[in-house]
Image: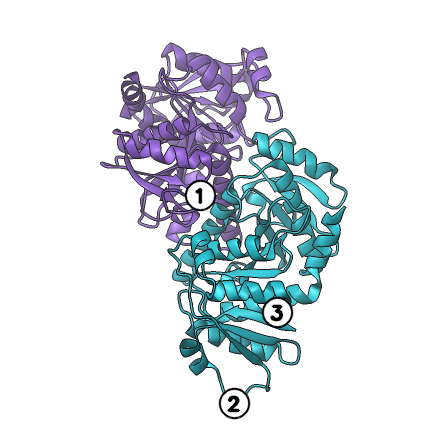
Chain colours: A purple, B cyan
C-alpha cells in the first residue's frame, strides 16, 4: 500500500514532514510505502540513503507550493504542479491509497471536492477531529470547519459518517451518536438542531442518544458528536488552547495529555471518494508520523467503501 | 440599598441560599440589606437571630416555588406567589435594587422579559458570563443562552452591553470587544458572523478588535466576547467541565481555579430595566454569597442607567 505525504506542507516543512515520514516508515515497515511529494531540491537531500528497507520511500516531484495565505480555490486551480494538487491526482488515480498534508486546510478541502469528489449521496464532506474521552477512548467531533453553515440533513449525515469512522477505523463496535446542543431536552436548540434531532432520531444506520451539552464532549455519552462546522471549529480550538495552557504550566495528566494533536496526527475529510487527512499547520515530526499511520489505518479499514455502500441507497 | 435573594432557588435551597446570604451580609454590612424571599416555614428558622447588625436581613414571604422541570412561561404566569415572581415584582417596583436567584434559568428570563422588561432600544437581553483571562483579569462572554438564534443586530448590541458592563461594573477603562468566529480574517464565518462583523466594526460606542477564534477565549485579545446563545452556552458548559475534570484530578492552578463558578457567583441578564442575576443550579453558599455581592456591585455601578442612556438614541 502507498501513503502519500505533502512534504512541503506545514510551518516546519520540509524538515518536519520528512522527519515524520521517517518515524512512520519504521512503524509501517512491510505494510506501506510512503510517497513524499515536493520540490526535488528541498526534499531529496533530507531522505535517508541507508537504514531503511529498500522501497520504504518513493519521491514524486512537485515544483510548486500553495502558501497558507493564498486563496484556496484560486491557488489549487492555478498551481497544478503544487504538492497538494499532485497529491490529490495520485490519490484520485489510485496510485496512492491515502494523502496526508499539514499544508493549507482550504486547499486540502478544495482538492477533496474538485479532484477526489464527494461520495454520491453525501451532501457535503465534513472534517472530523478526535476528542479524548475520560474513559480512555477517543471520540469523534464533526464537522470542525468544512461547513460553517449546515442544513439538518447535513448534520444527520455527519452522524452516519462519524459512526462509520468510529466503527471501521476506531473499532468501536456500537458507536453512539449525540447532537451538540444547548440543552438535553428534545425540544431545545436552534431550528437547525431541532430539525437535525428529529432526523437523527429516526435514522436506522445510527444509534442516536439525543442532545449533548458542552460538558458532554469528554464523557462517554456518545462516541460521535455532531455539530455544524462553526461550533465544532470553536470547540476544537478552545480545547486545543486548554491543552496548550496546561502544557505551558507544566500540568500533566494522562487524560489532558491526550489532547495533544501531535499524538493524533490529523483530521480526516469524511464523505469523499478517497482517504485524505489534514494535519495541523504546526505539525511536528511526531504529528506527521502519526498522521501517516492514521492514513494507513484509514486505508486499511476500507472506510471509504463502507461510506459508499451506506450512501448508495 | 436592598438586594433580594430567592431563598428557594437552587438544588441546595433553602439551606445553601440562606448560608450564602449570611456570607454576603458580612461583606455588605453597612452597605446593603439582604431581602430573603421564600416560604416562611422553610426560611425563617434558618435566619440568625443574633450576630448580625439589626436590619442586615429582611424577609418577604412567597408561598410557591417554581421547580426546575416546569415550563418557565407557564410556571411564572401561574405561580404568582412564587419566590421568583415575588422577587421580580419587588425589583420592578423599586423596593429592591437587584434580584438574584439560583432557581429556574428559564423562569428568571421570563420574569426579566415580562415583569422588568427590556430596555427600550435593546432588541433582546443577553445572559453574560465571566471568563477568567490568563492575565488575571476577567472577561465577559455573551450571550450564553438567552437567545439560541440571533440576528446580526443582536450580536452588535451584545457588544455594546458587554462593553458597558466591563466598563462600569468590572472597571475596565477601555474594553475591547471581539466576535467569536471560526477564523480571524474579516470574511470568515457564517452569514450571521459576517454581517455582525460589519456592524460591530462601525459601531461608535465600542472598541472592536475583530474576529476571535476558540483559542482566544482566555487570552487578552478582547475583554468582551460576543456570540449567539447557542455557541456561548456550549463554550461555557465545556469550560465548566474542564474545571470540574481538573478539580476531580486535584490539579490546581491559580488560573484554572478562577473557572470555579462559585467564586464568580452568577450570570447577569443585560439589557433589562433592572439588575437581575441568575445563579448556577448547584450553587453553594459561597456561590450565593458572591452572587449577592455581584448584585450589589451591579446596582451600585448604575450600569442599567448607562445602558438606558446608550440605547436611548
Q: Which quadrant would residue A175 be assigned to in this image?
A: top left
Q: Position of residue A125 (x, y in %)?
A: 42, 23
Residue at horizontal 33 percent and vertical 26 percent from the top: A298
Q: Quadrant of the C terminus of chain A?
A: top left
Q: Is B201 located above or below residue B103 in the figure?
A: above
Which residue is disc 2 drawn over? B50
Q: Chain of mark 3?
A: B
Q: Position of residue A6 (x, y in %)?
A: 48, 22
What number is the disc on residue A54? none
Task: Compute the Cα span from label 1 to label 2.
Answer: 56 Å
Task: Compute the Cα span from label 3 to label 2.
Answer: 24 Å
Q: Are marks 3 and 1 in contact (CB under 8 Å)?
A: no
Earlier sequence position, callout 3 versus callout 2 = 2
Left or right of residue A47, residue A26 in this image? left
Q: Looking at the picture, tell me which residue is in the foreground, A57 or B26.
A: B26
Callout 1: 10 Å neighbours few (<14), some, many (20+)? some
Left or right of residue B176, residue B238 in this image? left
- Numbered disc 1: secondary structure: loop
Q: Position of residue B304 (x, y in %)?
A: 68, 58
Q: Which quadrant would residue A130 be assigned to in this image?
A: top left
Amino acid at each position: 500500500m502507498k501513503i502519500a505525504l505533502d512534504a512541503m506542507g506545514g510551518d516546519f516543512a520540509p524538515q518536519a514532514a520528512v522527519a515524520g515520514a521517517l518515524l512512520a516508515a519504521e512503524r509501517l515497515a512491510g505494510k506501506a510505502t510512503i510517497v513524499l511529494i515536493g520540490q526535488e531540491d528541498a526534499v531529496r537531500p533530507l531522505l535517508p540513503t541507508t537504514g531503511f528497507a529498500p522501497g520504504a520511500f518513493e519521491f514524486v516531484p512537485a515544483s510548486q507550493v500553495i502558501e497558507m495565505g493564498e486563496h484556496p480555490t484560486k491557488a489549487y486551480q492555478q498551481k497544478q504542479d503544487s504538492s497538494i494538487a499532485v497529491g490529490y491526482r495520485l490519490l484520485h488515480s489510485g496510485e496512492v491509497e491515502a494523502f496526508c498534508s499539514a499544508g493549507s486546510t482550504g486547499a486540502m478541502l478544495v482538492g477533496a471536492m474538485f479532484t477526489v469528489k464527494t461520495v454520491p449521496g453525501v451532501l457535503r464532506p465534513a472534517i472530523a477531529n478526535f476528542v479524548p474521552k475520560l474513559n480512555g477512548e477517543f471520540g469523534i467531533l464533526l464537522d470542525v470547519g468544512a461547513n460553517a453553515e449546515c442544513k439538518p440533513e447535513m448534520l444527520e449525515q455527519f452522524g452516519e459518517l462519524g459512526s462509520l469512522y468510529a466503527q471501521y477505523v476506531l473499532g468501536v463496535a456500537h458507536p453512539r451518536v449525540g447532537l451538540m446542543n444547548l440543552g438535553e431536552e428534545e425540544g431545545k436548540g436552534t431550528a437547525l438542531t431541532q430539525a437535525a434531532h428529529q432526523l437523527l432520531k429516526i435514522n436506522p444506520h445510527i444509534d442516536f442518544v439525543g442532545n449533548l451539552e458542552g460538558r458532554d464532549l469528554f464523557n462517554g455519552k456518545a462516541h460521535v458528536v455532531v455539530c455544524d462546522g462553526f461550533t465544532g471549529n470553536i470547540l476544537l480550538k478552545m480545547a486545543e488552547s486548554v491543552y496548550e495552557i496546561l502544557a505551558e504550566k507544566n500540568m500533566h495528566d494522562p487524560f489532558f495529555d491526550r489532547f495533544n494533536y501531535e499524538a493524533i496526527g490529523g483530521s480526516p475529510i469524511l464523505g469523499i471518494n478517497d482517504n485524505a487527512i489534514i494535519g495541523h499547520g504546526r505539525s511536528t515530526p511526531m504529528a506527521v508520523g502519526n498522521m501517516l499511520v492514521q492514513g494507513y489505518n484509514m486505508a486499511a479499514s476500507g472506510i471509504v467503501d463502507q461510506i459508499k455502500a451506506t450512501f448508495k441507497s
